[in-house]
Image (spheres, rainbow, N blue to C red):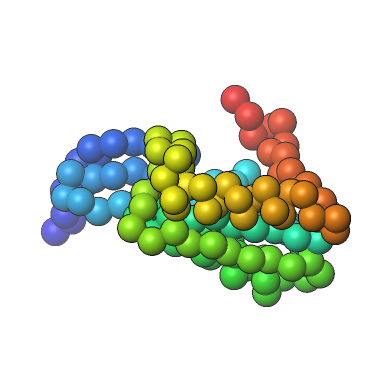
Amino acid sequence: MASAPKEIAVDMSPFFRLFKDGSIERLSPPQFQPPIGGMAGRRVMFFVAEKDLLRDRAWGYYEGLRKSAWAGEAEIMETREEGHCFHLFNSSSDKAVAIMDRGQLLHSSAYSRCCTFRVPTEFIS
């Protein structure tokens, strides 16, 4: 006998769905998984918060980048006991200042180059 479908509490497609039973379904559409082996730039810094629903995805992307054919340097900085976009809600907190300072240091370093992922227009509705 098939089980009843889960009831969705919050639908954040195309990123994830939260269900009333507390479970999360992470969605992975192709446009959010750009090819990284031939990416321009030499450095990438990932900023992630421990309580962010997208934390595991960020760590997976970081690990995937490090294992890829890309020849650059990747770093990750995880902020403990904080959630998604915490630095926008309290930008003067010590933790927010720390990640903004780290980002500024990377941006201003002589060998750092800015990289932007562009989603192909056929994926934009």
Judged left or right of residue 98, residue 85 is left
- Nearest the viewer among 42 and 70 is 42
- Nearest the viewer among 124 and 86 is 86
If the image is split into quadrants, where does the C terminus sit? Answer: top right
User: What residue occupies the far bottom of the structure in this picture?
Assistant: 67
Q: Please say if 47 is above or below 11.
A: below
x and y percentages locating residue 30 in the rendered image: 60, 48
Inspect this view and state whether residue 85 appears.
Answer: no
x and y percentages locating residue 75 in the rendered image: 64, 66
Q: Residue at x 44, y 52 (%)?
A: 95
Q: Quadrant of residue 19?
A: top left
Q: Please say if 93 is above or below 35.
A: above
Q: Residue at x 60, y 50 (%)?
A: 101
x and y percentages locating residue 22 in the rendered image: 20, 51
If the image is split into quadrants, where does the N terminus sit? Answer: bottom left
Inspect this view and state whether residue 42 appears.
Answer: yes
Q: Please say if 121 is above or below 65.
A: above
Judged left or right of residue 110, residue 1 is left
Q: Residue at x 59, y 70 (%)?
A: 63
Judged left or right of residue 82, residue 125 is right
- Nearest the viewer among 41 and 12 is 41
User: What residue occupies the far top of the structure in this picture?
Assistant: 125
